Amino acid sequence: MENFSNETIDITQLPKFEEVPFLSLKKSYWKVILINSFVVFLLLAIGLGFALVKIEELVAYQLEIGSVFGLFILIFVFFSHLSFKKKGFAFREHDVLFRYGIIATNTIVIPYNRIQHVALHEGMVSRYFGLAKIEIFTAGGSSSDIEIPGIEKEQAENIKQLLMGKIQKQL
């Protein structure tokens, strides 16, 4: 403990994650989002239709309710597209970065030494387009875990192998 020092760090010399070139999600992932959303909204529309038939007081307002539902779908699709365009990821020598957000852009930086487990998932629609999702579990709990969707399956498998190799080196 004789040589203890606690010097200040010049924060202007720190590496800036904002300058890292982020990779975008595959364009075909937008189709996956649209198809999944279509299925959900179709089921909601069917349920809403049955509700309108059962409640006789609302039958007179079918056009208004349908218009509001349609407007809601348009707003949802608009914001989903913005969210899709903002998402990006990058892998550096010591960490993985994931960027997301519409109004406020959030960037999560996870050092490889915090990663505990990596999983690869393919949904039914994603599999059709040859896409997968990488799920990275960390020591910090579920709030610091990340999911990177919309990656080509082969690339996702390579990323999983890279991360698993980093984990094995630390053991």
Image (cartoon, rainbow, N blue to C red):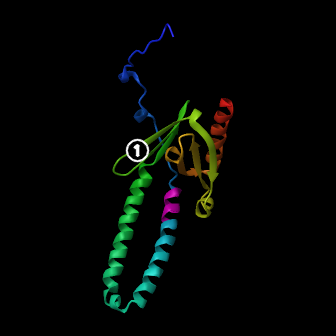
Q: Residues within 10 Å of mark 1 (few under 14, many from 20)?
A: few
Count the marks. 1
Magenta stretch, main secondary structure class = helix
Comparing 169 with 130, the one in front is 169
Quarter of the C terminus within the rendering: top right
Residue 170 in the image: x percent, y percent? 65, 30
Residue found at the very far front of the displayed protein: 1
Comparing 139 with 155, the one in front is 139
Query: Residue tagged by mark 1?
Result: 106
Residue 104 in the image: x percent, y percent? 35, 47
The quadrant where residue 6 appears: top left
Left of 159 or right of it: where is 78? Answer: left
* Residue at the image point whose x is 39% and y is 69% from the top: 73
* Residue at the image point whose x is 46% and y is 76% from the top: 44
* Residue at the image point whose x is 38% and y is 45% from the top: 105
Residue found at the very far bottom of the displayed protein: 56
Residue 114 in the image: x percent, y percent? 57, 36
Residue 67 in the image: x percent, y percent? 33, 78
The quadrant where residue 169 appears: top right
* Residue at the image point whose x is 65% and y is 46% from the top: 157
**32 is within the stretch colored magenta:** yes
Label 1 sits on what residue type?
Asn
Residue found at the very far top of the displayed protein: 2
Comparing 43 with 5, the one in front is 5
Q: As displayed, is residue 98 above or below residue 80?
A: above
Range of magenta residues: 28-34
**63 is within the stretch colored magenta:** no
Comparing 42 with 117, the one in front is 117
